[in-house]
Amino acid sequence: MKDKEILFYEGARLREFRRFDYNGRSEELAPYLADDSLKKAVQHAQVLERPLLLKGEPGSGKSRLAEAVAYELFGQRFRDFYFEWNIKSNSKAQDGLYVINYLQRLRDANLKNTRRRNLDIVLRTGMTTGQYVELGPLGRIFLATGAEPGLPPPVLLIDEIDKADIDFPNDLLQELDRMEFMIPEAVNERRQPVRIAAEKGRKPLIIITSNEEKALPAAFLRRCLFHYIRFPGVKELRAIVEARWPEMNRQLIEKATQVFNDLHEAIGTTATSIKNISTSELIDWITLIDHYHPAADGTLSLKDIPYEQALAKDIETMQTFLKFKSTTP
Amino acid sequence: MTTDHPFLYELFMALHADSRWPRPGMDEYFLLLQLLERHPQLAATFDEMAFACETLWAKSPAQQQFFREVFRTRRNDLETWLAAAQRHDDKKTSASQKDEASQSTNTGGSTPPHSPTGQKTMAENAPPSPPPGTRPPATPPSTTTQKKEEQEYIEMSVGHGEPAGSGRYMPIPENGGTLPLSKRFFLGKEYFPVSSRVLQQDWRNLVSRQEYAGPSEPDMPRTVRRIATEGFFLDFEYQPRSSNRLALFIFIDRGPGMEAFLPFGVELAQSAVASLAHLYCYPWFFSELPLRDDNPDNGYLLTNQQRTRGTNTFSLFRPVIQQNRVVLIYSDAAAIRGHQPGVEEWQRTENFIGYLLQQTAYVAWMNPAPSHRWKDTKAARIAEQFPEIGMYEATRTGLGQVIDSLKGKTAFKTHRNQ
């Protein structure tokens, strides 16, 4: 039984640079090329309204997917429906729901004699900030689900969830399941307890990324769909570079991506370095090549490109790269 | 494509039965049905269905890899079976035509495990399942044709969780293709007395926070107290920086008798490293008892797990001051074999323990053998003669006691009283 029409992510709208102004803010979005399996995984998450957990090598495009999906679904207004929660080692699950400014309240309490004011923690219905209280990214996205009923559900990125404490994912289970939570400390304008909930039947699309630094609990994994973004092959790398530098000489791109791919494979096979080179390093490398050799063509030799600083982040990788340079024409 | 496909159920059970990773629950199976119900076009082809199952059920790259292998094997099975069923049909048709022609009757032997009757409808949906209780005949059939027919079938388990006796009958692939073997006897981490997650969490309790710099960190409780006292906010109160300075050294016995318990020892060490709780955390290995270095100043010799690298305790301990060194020994102390130490062996054990007590702040001993096996062995003797190092079982309680002991709390007394 089809219960509703879904606007699926097809990865078609962000295949080239997008530059536009929205609400007085100039936006620039780099191209994002998703492969078919990634598109399908997002579509499954859209249908089942479950969080999508992404893993993959650093630089494989995990964190940028959410932005690309939001742009595809909402176009130039995507900032209104796209939320990010960047996890740090000291992040707590509570921070994603709401934060209460106790220090401000204490200061106001001490100044009560000179400036009388209500010290209640108040969050008005439908507002993201109130008196001494502010909603976190999860709270804000739950509210955003009720904003414009005709539009697709908003998108939330929970970036690098494995950075947080080991109990962090477990503390989010209930909120991710029910898509609602209470703020027991606060009241609304009618002096009633505050309940923040996602609109029924319009659960947000949550994309979670992990670098596998810590194991995630089974109970959390069971609530997510999982997709591993494999490292792009030469063709995909070439497409990424071509999308970003449409003016660049095709032969040069082909040569550079081939060298990059060979280097990636060599480091992966020999395991000389703990960190393999990633797509973001390729982009840095090509940026330097483009900057210093704007009119270069396919005849440019790799020997003339001494920008290993952009690629190699340790001495082993640098040595491997220099070896490549000496053997490649 | 129907949603109640037994093929999917078998796939799911294969993944569910493997204990190497978190098992998918029934709700994950229902998720697939939900997906098929809501948007069947997302799983319209065989490969799309495989991808959907993989996204919904597998939760790590390794599990995805395993899933693909299982799926490929099952797919091959299905295709091989369909081809065999087709051949069987053709053969049966030609045989019955011959029978009719020769008017001969052949009633000896038994029918093949799954008769072609009704196979076509089954083939559209599922791999074959025999009628309940059907088995190949125990005695060889009388005719050559029947022998040949029977040799085409073997009994095998199709699901990882299925008992061997309840196997179904599948045709042997003629091209010598691989049969889906059961992997349920592979060693996993499930039998460990304490799960890795609990280990990691518990290791984080083994901390000794020490100040190491001048006052530079805001001290919020003191700041708030001061604000409350003075009635206004002037400045933050500061406190010195502090961090856990404890170095945990784990010495693991890989001698005879410890073979079955070694994986837990390794897990113990790996979880301690993964917990990132300690300044230094080293797992090192020895066999029965570490050897004394030729140079007595160097202490005792230890190796890495593969025995490709060696070190001595002097080099290990040197970067850390004595009060921050804690040592956990993971060994059965001959309790598994029930071995009473000789005079010389006991002397060496005493020397080793004495050396550790002299060089480190605290030492604890985790014994994989249950405590009732310690009696009349070296384990009991160590526990009795060295009360300052606790000897604990490799259990959740034991782990808590080990950590207490390494923090300098006298947990061993509680254990000994028990």
Image (spheres, coloured by chain):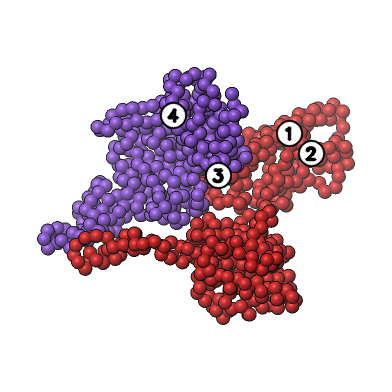
Chain colours: A purple, B red
Asked which secondary structure carries label 3, the reply is loop
Q: Which residue is mark 3?
A: A274
Total marks shown come to 4
- Tell me which label, 1 or 2, sits earlier in the chain: 1
Left or right of residue B242, residue B330 in this image: right
Check the image and report above or below for B402 versus B7. Answer: below
Q: Amino acid at mark 1?
A: Ala
Residue A89 image offset from top left, x and y in percent: 42, 52
> Which residue is tagged 1?
B84
- Which amino acid type corresponds to the residue marked 3 in the rendered image? Ile
- For the N terminus of chain B, which image quadrant? top right
Pointer 2 and pointer 3 on the same chain = no
User: Which chain hosts label 3?
Assistant: A
Q: Is residue A306 visible?
A: yes
Question: In what element is the residue under mark 4?
Answer: helix
Res B188 quadrant in image: bottom right
Name the residue type under label 4. Answer: Thr
Residue A287 is marked as: 4
Tell me the distance, in whole angstroms, between the alpha carbons under discs 4 and 3.
25 Å
Q: Which residue reaches farthest left? A: A114
Residue ID for mark 2: B152
**Horizontally, is B20 left or right of B86 in the view?**
left
Pointer 1 chain: B
Disc nearer the start of the sequence (4/3): 3
Q: CA distance from mark 4 to mark 1?
A: 58 Å
Q: Secondary structure at mark 2?
A: loop
Q: Would residue B275 be found to the left or right of residue B219 on screen? A: right
Q: Are marks 3 and 1 on the same chain?
A: no
Crowd tier of the residue under label 4, counting other residues whose Cα lies within 10 Å: few below 14, some 14–19, many 20 or above: some
